[in-house]
Image (tube, rainbow, N blue to C red):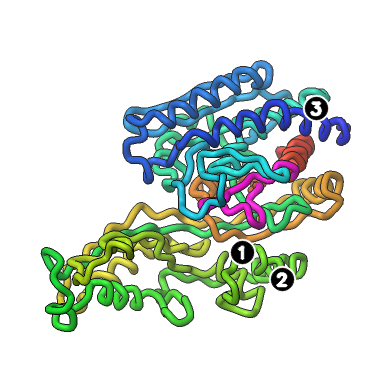
Amino acid sequence: MNSDQLLETVNTFWDNHITPTLTEYIKIPNKSPSFDPKWEENGHMKKVVDLAVKWTNEHKPRNSILSVKQTEKRTPIILVDIPGDIEGNILMYGHLDKQPEMEGWNKGMGPWIPVMKNGKLYGRGGADDGYALFSSILAINALREQNISLPRILILIEFCEESGSPDLPHYMNLYADIIKAPDLVVCLDSGAGDYRRFWTTTSLRGLIGATLKVEVLTEGVHSGGASGHVPSSFRIARQLLSRIENEKTGEVLLDELKTKIPDYRLKETEEFVSVLGNEVVEEFPWKETMKPSSSDNVEGVLRRTWRPALSVVGADGLPPSANAGNVLRPFTQLQLSMRIPPLVDPTKAQEAMRKALTKNPPYNAKVTLHIEEGASGWNAPETKPWLSKAMNKYSKIFFKEPSGSLCEGGTIPFMAMLGEQFPKAQFVITGVLGPGSNAHGPNEFLHIPYAKKLTACVASILSDFRAD
């Protein structure tokens, strides 16, 4: 394989065919079903499917089969089945649904407003991870251009990943004869420690989403006449959360949500911090003198990758400050996001949370807890020598730096499904979500120069594939 020719092909194709398409994709508010219950009626998902199908039909590898599968009342999946000429099966994965808008975008920018600035394409979904389908097809075509022999490759794109992939197990079972047992899984939905090398993810946390509602009155009443006598629903909610989290340290208190961190992951984290140094802190947009929860960078990274952590990500029953009268509110509702470490059983974790938050509520308040289906974390199997060698080799060729590995604090439900279903598979979990890219938040961007080199690395790794 000629690496210079490959990179030239990748750069040109990105500029001519991928960046313009991602620009159009960003304009479509294709929010995941959890954030757009009327997704079918609103039609944004269909627009994205049509855009992806049209583009894929124009650029798909020769002899490949493109199909869109959709069961009634479920989100669709896109499959691109590319026959191979050597033994083996590769599964490449991405998604085309998006997180909601989020406030705080810079002036002139917005979630559905694509803006190119300093090589970065701003807008929701380009990096997380709308580019995956297009980059995967490019990687295969770039190898075909040089007559590189490849195994059979299946590209699978889903449309509910940001909702926890609830429809994916259905399709995995329904189309098991098409998906088969992959020898190698390539996922383009993860992060990067920096933009200077090729990164792979070796573990992911799981996720439990929950809605906690505390009710104390049937309607709001004058705070002057009621406060003190009628307990505040917010104070009760705060007490309940203290049952599962130490509010001073952030430590999650439930044993069912913790795991022993493997020694090799501790060592990997130490190596990760030794490479990036204080960049593991500086990547976040800290406000003025704000400090992290730990001054030890290794411990800080472990807290966002291998320890459970609770975030309150939304609330109801709280009027905007400008419209908040002196009223003791009848209820407080909080949306909880509990990240759980790899190796933790989400079912046991859910039950522990339910028991802690609902048993014997203060003042006998009415407490309602709705827990969404939990997503398991994932811990990578041992990487085979050929794959480790290939990742490091091509990182040095295209980035001039050795490859790196990292543990991620986010969740990709599909990886846990695959890891359980196909324990012998090898994994390349990578992506463009490096420092500042801010997936799910304001000013999300896709680092185009990095995405091009990452595409070249992925293509080159595929060229070295071995089924044994």
**Residue located at (69% from left, 46% from top):** 447
- At mark 1, the secondary structure is loop
- Answer whether residue 445 is magenta in the image: yes
Q: Hey, which quadrant is residue 315 in on the image?
A: bottom left
Q: Amino acid at mark 2?
A: Asn
Q: Earlier in the sequence, mark 2 or mark 3?
A: 3
How packed is label 2: few (under 14 Cα within 10 Å), some, or many (20 or more)? few
Residue 444's tag is none
Pick whichever, 137 or 217, lies toward us: 217
Magenta segment, which residues?
Answer: 432-449
- Residue 57 in percent (x, y) is at 60, 18
Viewer-side label of 1, 3: 1
Mark number, residue 284: 1
Q: Is residue 184 visible?
A: no
Taking the magenta stretch, the answer to whether it contains residue 422 is no
On the rendered structure, is 136 left or right of 72?
A: right
User: Quick check: 385 left or right of 297?
Assistant: right
Query: 10 Å neighbourhood of mark 1: few (<14), some, or many (≥20)?
Result: few
